[in-house]
Amino acid sequence: MGNIHDKCGIFAVSSPKEVNIQLLVEGIRLLQHRGQESAGIAYAENGEILTIKGPGLVDEVFKENLNKFIKNGIGHVRYSTSGKSSIEEAQPLGDSGVVIAFNGTISNYYQFGSFKVDTEFIYRFFKQKLTFHSIPDTVKEFMRVVDGGYSVAILLNDEEIVVFRDPRGFHPVVLGFLEGSLVVSSEDSVIRQLGGSVLKHILPGEVIIMKNGKILYDKVIYEEEKSYATCSFEYIYFARPDSNIDGHSVYSARIRLGELLAEKHPANGDIVVPVPDSSRPIALGFSRKSRVPLEEPLVRTISSVRSFIMPTQDKRNEVLEEKFGVVVDAVRDKRIVLIDDSIVRGNTMKRIISMLRNAGAKEIHVRIGSPMIKYPCYMGIDFPKREELIAHNKSEREIGNELNADSIEFLSVEEMVQAIGRRDLCNACFSGIYPLKFKYNSTELERVFGK
């Protein structure tokens, strides 16, 4: 996997009885893979909202168990797709009356005023509109005027929780049931791991209002964008492999990506080697289909974090220095088929190839379980600037030469769609075709988002 930023993760709980606030903390801990810059929770108490948040991992922010019981609260793990990495912009974001937890990017937030970050715009919008309008009417107006991908959880000081998903369904969000409580999560695997059951995948354009464990309102209120455009990278990389998105298994999709990669882009090798961790199912599918044995000589160090989460290149390079170890005996004199889910800048892949060659690998043939990433994203993935994308203006041969690989091949967009098993995907980062509602000046978008 290249150095790209993951999405954020949101979690919420609404219970008829008081539950330990650690449920919120555990929920966002299980979503840690979706954001490692900051973590936070917010809960309602005595007519106001209290927020606890900080920079770093969940376990760094919540070092001690909180002796607190709540009925309604929301949580968030973050990486920044707009704005800067700072505690002021960490989520949940808001005040004592309205607090926002948000996954995605509002593509046109800059058109509504001078906001440091799109989450601030969401907060200001609801703070103002809810003074005069109902929650459903406010959400519907929000969906009408904004663009981009978003799954949002809002906590109000009367303890109501509002959850909604954008009309194209770019980002998943799921409603579940856990020991008498309603829970909301960016991924269904978290609900199951906590011992709960999944009630539904929230639909595009759907809004749910809940309080004290009861659903007060549940309706699809905006249907003008009738077709899904779910982020293909959820299946390729972002989501946990034990997650299911809108009825499609992430693990099965990754297996099929590998199988199709072996069928359409074979390579002569002695062993198939995955880049841990997300490419393992892809490598397994490739190995099964090609009948080339799977080995795991790349060892991810316990201290390693996802390098794409790091906000600066220096930080990313520091992480790369200690990210992997190599089992020399497993790669010496071997022809390696090296499998990864994607390549963005190429920093990680270049270093891995160098390590494998230093360990005595005879040949290294790289096969990627996604198409070439050529364009930036404005719906929730913080791909780097266009000129930093290694595939933006290079052929496969040129990329292979730059990485010092003997060969490199990617899936086509159609092959990826076939493998995932659904056509209603957003492929903008591969194709440059953005399924957005409004027309934009690309120069303006690049200026605002720094891409």
Image (spheres, rainbow, N blue to C red):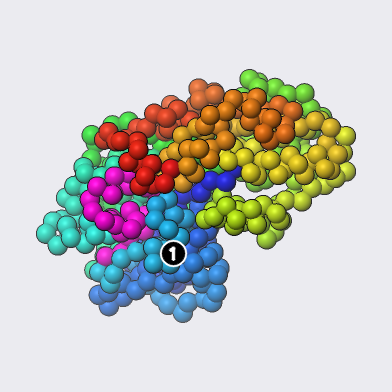
Q: Nearer the viewer, residue 186 or 109?
A: 109
The local crowd at label 1, few if under 14, some if 14 to 19, many if 20 or more residues have their Cα within 10 Å, is few
Q: Which of the 4 quarters of the picture holds residue 282?
A: top right
Which of the 4 image quadrants contains residue 350? top right
Residue at 84 percent of width and 32 percent of height? 362
Q: Is residue 117 magenta?
A: yes
Instruction: Tell me where residue 364 appears, x and y as whole percent.
Output: 76, 32
Whether residue 341 is situated above or below residue 158 in the rendered picture? above
Among all residues in the image, which is located at the extreme top? Answer: 264
Amino acid of disc 1: Ser
Residue 434 placed where, x, y %?
Answer: 37, 32
The residue indicated by pointer 1 is 86
Kindly identify the residue that appears in the image at 50 percent across and 60 percent down.
37
Residue depicted at 29% across the width and 36% down the height: 440
**Numbered disc 1: secondary structure:** loop
With 215 as the anchor, is 338 left or right in this view? right
The magenta stretch is 98-122
